[in-house]
Amino acid sequence: MNTNSLKSWLPTVSISLASFIFVTSEFIPVGLLPEISAGLGKSEAFTGLLMTIYAWIVATMSLPMTVVSSHWDRRRLMLILLGTFVVANLASGLAASFGMLLVCRIIVAFAHAVFWSIAIPLAIRLGPAGGRAKALSIIAMGASLGNILGIPLGTFLGQSFGWRMAFSLIALVAFVIYVILYRMLPSLPSQSITTFKNVPSLFKRKSLVLVYLMTALTVTGHFTAFTYIKPFLLAVGGISTDFVVVLLLVFGASGVFGSILGSKIIYKHPKNALWISLGIVFSSLLLMTLAVHSQIWLMALAFVWGTALTLLCLIFQSAVLKEAPDVQDVAMSLYSGIFNIGIGGGALLGSISSTNHIGSVGYVGAIFVLASLMLSAKFQISELKHTEGAVGH
């Protein structure tokens, strides 16, 4: 099969579109935290717990739900997940209370818990043989577009027409993607039946455990600051809400750049890419308070920060696939769960830090990224460049 054939990549692209809308929905509260809290009569710190609860539902349910659904046809499973996603986001747009919104978010989180466990292995399986790196880049591009288009646009609509409009629009776009998936995805029987017996063996693989630990620390540090980026910009820098949208757009654009760059460098220079990217994220968190008084410096900081974070996600995902080629669904479900432990933990730490002093969120987050940077010296990642190869359909 011709790897460069556009038609051969369409099924993988359709999974990328689904990743776009899942990312948009997951992080839309970041851009609309003040609006949601005001609309529901809650404090921003309390409303931020929507992120924590969502993330920890994903973290705790990723593995068990992946195991339960491991024998399902992949096409059927993906359509069920996205259909549930559509209904729950539509209901979010109609939520009249914090409790109702929380229930809707929990339902979305259950769908999310399985989606990221199967999306990357499925995208690789659907793509042409030998296209692992390109498939990863395509999925990363979809997720990045969620940041560059979905979150800023949702934030703008929420600020202009109310936060409920943002959730309603997410539901509408998700329905369109559902139709595309319905038409594009072939029937794909499960390649293996996953059981909990596979899990203990993963924790005997030292390199894999180290990837999981670095992921948890890095993501916790990032989301300690990023969850409260809008309150931080408004309170510390006196930034206008319009510029917040611009900054989120820049951050998202950096993700697209990072996904393109990552497909070219992480297999050639994985160690250097890991260390440099961790160093950039660490420095970015430290520099938030200094950069907040200059829009130019903020945009530059957002771009390099987002690029480095995207590279880290690609490196971690590639390492997980390399270290567990025999049980990719289980390994990726654990990765997704651990990633979301980091999101939830970061949102909780950000909530505590913002209650005491909103300006401290970057410094608190930097501590965790520094710990990840120190651990990275022990990780043998030089063989990532050898993971490229044929992946069966």
Image (tube, rainbow, N blue to C red):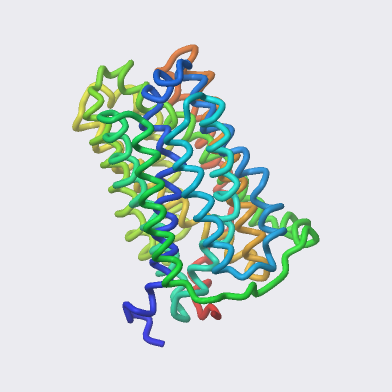
Q: Is residue 91 above or below residue 321?
A: above
Q: Nearer the viewer, residue 380 or 115?
A: 115
Q: Image point 28% across, 28% down: which residue?
A: 159
Q: Is residue 179 above or below residue 10?
A: above
- Which residue appears farthest toward the left when viewing the image? 296
* Residue 211 shows in this picture: no
Please indicate whether residue 253 sits to the left or right of residue 62 in the image. Answer: left
Percent x, y of residue 265: 38, 62
Q: Image point 35% across, 44% down: which residue?
A: 169
Q: Image point 49% across, 14% down: which residue?
A: 355
Please indicate whether residue 365 sits to the left or right of residue 189 in the image. Answer: left
Q: Nearer the viewer, residue 115 or 102?
A: 102
Percent x, y of residue 307: 34, 48
Please indicate whether residue 309 sits to the left or right of residue 113 in the image. Answer: left
Q: Image point 61% across, 45% down: which residue?
A: 338
Percent x, y of residue 298: 26, 31
Q: Is residue 190 above or below residue 233?
A: below
